[in-house]
Image (spheres, rainbow, N blue to C red):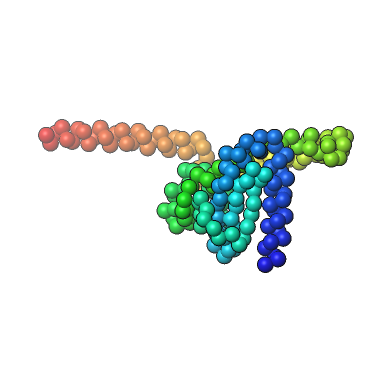
Amino acid sequence: MLWTVLPTQLVESFANHILHLDGQTPQRLQKLEGRRLRLSLKELGKPLTLGVTAQGVMLSWVDDSIVDCHIVTEIAVLPELRDSANITRLIKADKLDIEGDPMLAQQLSKLLTDLDIDWPEQLSQRLGDVPAQLLVNAFRRGRKRAERFQADSQQWVRDALVEEQHLLPARERFIQFQQDMQALRAQVDKLERHLKEQQG
């Protein structure tokens, strides 16, 4: 039991600390106060209950009281729940089961994703202005390098598939193919109309 309680308490404390770094958190918590969500992940076997109070969120593995929403799914499906358009598809594919208010999960997700934290200010309060600025600059440089690496990798894969392996057509060829298909459809429709006129 200790193996679940200790990490859960650490995650709960960390989440509440991060939440309170944003000045808008109390208003967001107020809108969700008293709401409870239970998440049963097939890989874990035990449900995790998340409750919202005016002070933050509470996590529990042993809470079995009534909740506003109970979600049964897999870990891999969780990122797809951000977009409400995916919910119906996931339910039909038997990857998601929801009892109760399905929008509550998205509201709780937005509680974290809508955070607006001034990280340079937070760092400067803890480390001082100069070290904080060095860290922020290093992070920005690293993020730019990662974005550039990702773009270069995507371009390399695209080039390899189109030019070297000929697995995918070049964009110009694909556009020409679409135009040819539309012209062919128009000719077939015209021919069908002509045949109907001749028969009728």
Name the quadrant of the N terminus: bottom right
Where in the figure is residue 151, as x and y percent of width and height? 65, 40
Rendered residue at 12%/36% (across/down): 199
Name the quadrant of the C terminus: top left
Q: Is residue 113 left or right of residue 200?
A: right
Could you tell me if residue 21 is visible in this image?
Answer: yes
Where in the figure is residue 150, as x and y percent of width and height? 66, 43
Could you tell me if residue 152 is visible in this image?
Answer: no
Where in the figure is residue 53, as x and y percent of width and height? 63, 46
Rendered residue at 48%/47% (across/down): 102
Q: Is residue 11 left or right of residue 91?
A: right
Where in the figure is residue 24, as x and y percent of width and height? 66, 35
Residue projecting furthest to the bottom: 1
Q: Is residue 185 left or right of residue 105?
A: left
Q: Nearer the viewer, residue 74 or 193?
A: 74
Rendered residue at 79%/34% (across/down): 121
The picture quadrant where one finds residue 2 is: bottom right
